């Protein structure tokens, strides 16, 4: 996959998804019925989290692998179309369960905090893409604040988490013997 780079010149409203989603939900219901024995339907909040994971974890990863200048295991074959399909599948699943569940106020604080991090990061990306570095920085700072709150909730030491991440990166990519001073 080659990444199409260009300049954002005009922001338009997204195309209406109503007809597509109606068909997607119908197709997802049929697949869910056939696979219920191995793939039970998650609750709405978890379906939304899975959709976020597919989008942020898989679709964006597949897009970023198209930038050859980064070490992203670019030789790994990824199927962007399949990843997009998985994201749509989870969105459709959330729409299926949404009408059958009662919304609860912060029923799952872990999911809430993780979503706040994701929203702040998405906002930072949008601001960066439209040329507002100040707003992008504010979004990154907000994301970090929410991630610290998530760490507190999960009893994760953020310094230790970052240290372990750096150790993993150095173990994989460090040029031993080089002076990085």
Image: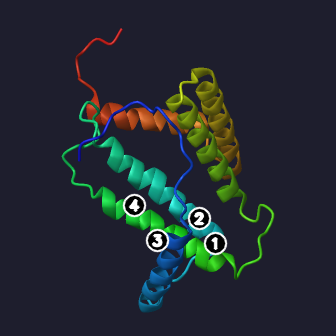
Above or below, 88 against 109 in this view is below
Residue neighbourhood size for the residue with mark 1, other residues' Cα within 10 Å, grouped as few (<14), some (14–19), many (≥20): many
Circle 1 residue: 44
Circle 3 residue: 89
Q: Earlier in the sequence, mark 2 or mark 3?
A: 2
**Which of the two marks, 4 or 2, is nearer to us in this view?**
4
Q: Earlier in the sequence, mark 1 or mark 4?
A: 1
**Which of the two marks, 2 or 3, is nearer to us in this view?**
3
Q: Is residue 102 left or right of residue 163?
A: right
At mark 4, the secondary structure is helix
Q: Which mark is residue 84?
A: 4
State the image coordinates of residue 138 (x, y, percent, origin top left): 65, 27
Q: Earlier in the sequence, mark 4 or mark 2?
A: 2
**Which of the two marks, 1 or 4, is nearer to us in this view?**
4
Q: Is residue 107 left or right of residue 68?
A: right
Q: Residue shown at 77%/61% (left/top)?
A: 106
Q: Residue furthest right?
A: 105
């Amino acid at each position: 996959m080659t990444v199409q780079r260009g300049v954002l010149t005009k922001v338009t409203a997204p195309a209406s998804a109503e007809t597509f989603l109606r068909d997607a939900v119908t197709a997802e219901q049929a697949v869910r019925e056939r696979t219920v024995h191995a793939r039970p339907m998650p609750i709405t909040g978890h379906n939304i989290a899975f959709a976020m994971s597919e989008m942020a974890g898989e679709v964006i990863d597949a897009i970023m692998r198209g930038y050859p200048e980064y070490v992203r295991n670019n030789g790994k074959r990824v199927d962007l179309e399949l990843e997009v399909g998985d994201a749509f599948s989870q969105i459709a699943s959330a729409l299926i369960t949404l009408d059958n569940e009662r919304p609860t106020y912060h029923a799952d604080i872990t999911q809430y905090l993780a979503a706040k991090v994701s929203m702040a990061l998405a906002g930072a990306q949008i601001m960066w893409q439209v040329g507002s570095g100040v707003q992008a920085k504010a979004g990154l700072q907000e994301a970090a604040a929410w991630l610290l709150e998530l760490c507190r909730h999960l009893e994760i030491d953020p310094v230790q988490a970052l240290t372990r991440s750096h150790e993993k990166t150095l173990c994989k990519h460090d040029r031993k013997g080089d002076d990085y001073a």
